Image (cartoon, grey):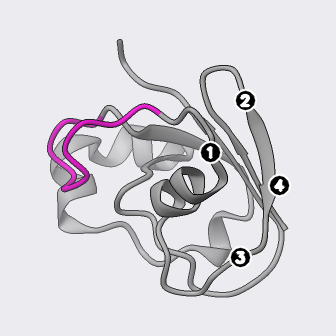
Amino acid sequence: MITLTGKTLTREVEPKVGATLLQLAQEAGVDWLFNCSRGTCARCRCLIREGAERLEEATDAEWDRLGPDELDEGFRLGCQAKIASPGRISAVNRTYF
């Protein structure tokens, strides 16, 4: 299961390999903040609390927008972080603003 926490809502959803965390949050009705869904605004920034190893590698957009320090701390962009394998993942939307 995947636990997605938005601004005020938390939902558990089934993992879908190839889907982004933002896509799953939208499908589940989680109030996950975002603007562009292309990796440039970083509004969908999230902290991966559990299961980072079940996500695909960080994209170029994430390296450009977040940088190595935030990636090392467990931050990802919800629009870029794709599910690579099923299993337990927990993510919290942590926008800058």
Left or right for 84, reference 33: right
Q: For the N terminus, give its image quadrant.
A: bottom right
Looking at the picture, how far across and down is residue 48, in whole percent?
63, 48
* Residue 31 is inside the magenta segment: no
The disc placed on residue 15 is 3
The disc placed on residue 29 is 1
Counting every numbered tag in the picture gives 4
Q: For the C terminus, give its image quadrant.
A: top left
Mark closer to the observer (1, 3) = 1
Viewer-closest of 5 and 57: 5
Residue behind mark 2:
9
Label 2 to label 1, Cα distance in Å?
8 Å
* Amino acid of disc 3: Pro
Q: Earlier in the sequence, mark 2 or mark 1?
A: 2
Residue in the picture at 32% in, 32% down:
43
* Amino acid of disc 1: Gly
**Label 3's element?**
loop
Label 2 to label 4, Cα distance in Å?
10 Å
Residue 78's place in the image compared with 53, above or below, is: above
Q: Residues within 10 Å of mark 4 (few under 14, many from 20)?
A: some
Q: Earlier in the sequence, mark 1 or mark 4?
A: 4
Looking at the picture, how far across and down is residue 22, in whole percent?
47, 54
Q: Which residues are magenta?
A: 33-42
The disc placed on residue 12 is 4
Q: Earlier in the sequence, mark 3 or mark 2?
A: 2
Residue in the picture at 73% in, 64% down:
51
* Amino acid of disc 2: Leu
Looking at the picture, how far across and down is residue 30, in whole percent?
62, 40
**Label 1's element?**
loop
Q: Are marks 2 and 4 in contact (CB under 8 Å)?
A: no
Left or right for 57, reference 2: left
